[in-house]
Image (cartoon, rainbow, N blue to C red):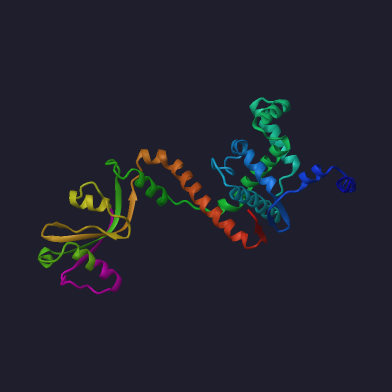
Amino acid sequence: MFALFVALFLGGPVSAQEKLIDKIAAVVNGRVYSLSEIERMEATLSARREIAPFIYSKDKYERSELLDVAIHGQIIREKLGTQGYVVSDDAVENSIRSTEQKLGLNRESLLEFLRTKGLTYEEYFEVIRESMEFNLFASRIIAPLVTVTEQEMKNEYYRRHATDKALSFVYTVVDFSVPESQAKGKAKGAYEQALRDYQLTGRLGGGYSDLEANPLEGVREDGLHPSIASALSSTPEGSFTPAVSIGGRLRSFYVKKKDLVESQAYINAKERLGDEIFTTKSRALTQNWFDREYANYYIKKLL
């Protein structure tokens, strides 16, 4: 009898009221995320990955990670709003209609597709909105902070093709040399270490009193002594090459600049390399951006 009275007082059966009880997954500036929301994201992850792969980029997510995705979406929306960017319902609807036209679908075909994916139209609508907001965020907030230099592309190309004998470089170096007689009886690498110390302190030890230093620009591998060419090609910028003995003098080259000569193969790969480096740097910058933004929010996670 008491159960019946409570059910009537609350406006429905006890079982119906029990279904309304949900656990809180997080609270972010007053926005409450329920566990059922996160569970729904988990259940429809496959469809979400198809619609917004740049947001749902992983094959599997822990619930705590899906919660982070949801919180990131809220932060993006609010940040865009402060800059005057709002993705309205009309804008989302226009985007959906444009997609339907491109794919030759009508609305019923789209709804049937969503049913096969286990996604409601309302959920699809919001994922499209999130995608549009993320694109705005990436282009308006993150992209201006990312730079990709010519040297970064050349370095990455060299890293991937370090064993390719067709690679050619032009160097800016300083040629340090001493008579071989001053290196006799010293341990291997002693000369290079003396040069590194000299660079740091301005004092040259080790008995290399007849050191000569000659700055050279535009040095190409063509015509270089094979041992020098080999030493230069394996030495990164800002380092000394292993010492080589030529013409009665022990030489080590400090590599100030190492530029890849733009072969056709590099030119063909350049745009792709730039895009890949941009994407990698954008991801790292985006995560750092969110880490900083979290400090501006009250965030209580319960997952």
Q: How many marks?
A: 0
Position of 3 with respect to 137 (left or right) is right
Q: Is residue 225 left or right of residue 264?
A: left
Asked whether 102 or 3 is in front, the reply is 3
Classify 118 as above or below 300.
Answer: above
**Quick one: which residue is furthest to the front in this view?**
1
Inspect this view and state whether residue 139 appears. no
Specify the quadrant of the image occupied by residue 28. Answer: bottom right
On the image, the x and y values in percent for residue 73 come to 65, 49
Nearer to the camera, 232 or 78:
78
Residue numbers of the magenta segment: 195-218
Res 266 visible: yes
Relative image position of residue 62 (x, y in whole percent): 57, 47
Closest to the observer, 157 or 3 = 3
Q: Which residue lies at the image location 52% right of the left edge and 50% below the top edge?
A: 283
Which quarter of the figure has residue 110? top right
Whether residue 187 appears in magenta in the rendering, the answer is no
> Residue 206: x and y, percent?
17, 71
- Say which residue appears at 62% left-offset and 35% top-offset: 47
User: Height in image: 292 above or below 44?
Assistant: below
Position of 17 compared to 140: left or right? right
**Is 214 one of the magenta-colored residues?**
yes
